[in-house]
């Protein structure tokens, strides 16, 4: 019954911006936290950012610090990832994830994953 659908990926030039969105079909305690992972070609899956519907946020380290912002629209069951000052290193498939806590999202032990949306930054 729970599924996640991402959108907003695309091709942008370095320094540009994109906003990703993820809509959750059904919110339960198992989807109390939403987040974003990304996986670049040849690299391991990496946590980007996460939030809870109640307002807690969590960001990853230096790679995205100060450039990405996660936000939500509770009425629409949607989480957003605003990505600014994009770099070629940000090129990856971005996945929306949902789990019972930010910890679950952070460690990638979430039950629900979206299909993924491709972000490509030209340089």
Image: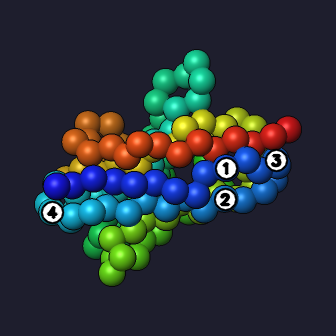
CB atoms at circles 2 and 4 under 8 Å apart?
Answer: no
The x, y position of residue 62, in whole percent, is: 61, 43
Residue situated furthest top in the rendering: 42
Residue at horizontal 24 percent and vertical 50 percent from the top: 99
Nearer the observer, 52 or 23 = 23
- The residue that disc 4 covers is 28
What number is the disc on residue 14?
A: 3
Q: Nearer the viewer, mark 2 or mark 1?
A: 1
The numbered mark, 3 or 4, whose residue comes first in the sequence reads: 3
Identity of the residue drawn at 77% across and 50% down:
12
Determine the secondary structure under disc 1.
strand
Residue 118, quarter of the rendered image: top right
> Mark 1 = which residue?
10
Q: Secondary structure at mark 2?
A: strand
Tag 4 secondary structure: loop
**Is the C-beta separation of discs 2 and 1 under 8 Å?**
yes
Q: CA distance from mark 3 to mark 4?
A: 38 Å
């Amino acid at each position: 019954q729970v599924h996640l659908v991402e959108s907003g990926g695309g091709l942008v030039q370095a320094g540009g911006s994109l906003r990703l969105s993820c809509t959750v079909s059904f919110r339960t305690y198992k989807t109390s936290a939403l987040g974003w992972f990304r996986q670049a070609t040849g690299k391991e899956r990496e946590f980007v950012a996460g939030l809870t519907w109640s307002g807690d946020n969590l960001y990853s380290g230096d790679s995205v610090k100060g450039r990405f912002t996660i936000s939500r629209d509770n009425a629409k069951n949607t989480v957003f990832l605003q990505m600014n000052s994009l770099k070629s290193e940000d090129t990856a498939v971005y996945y929306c994830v949902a789990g019972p806590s930010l910890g679950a999202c952070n460690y990638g032990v979430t039950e629900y994953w979206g299909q993924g949306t491709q972000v490509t930054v030209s340089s």
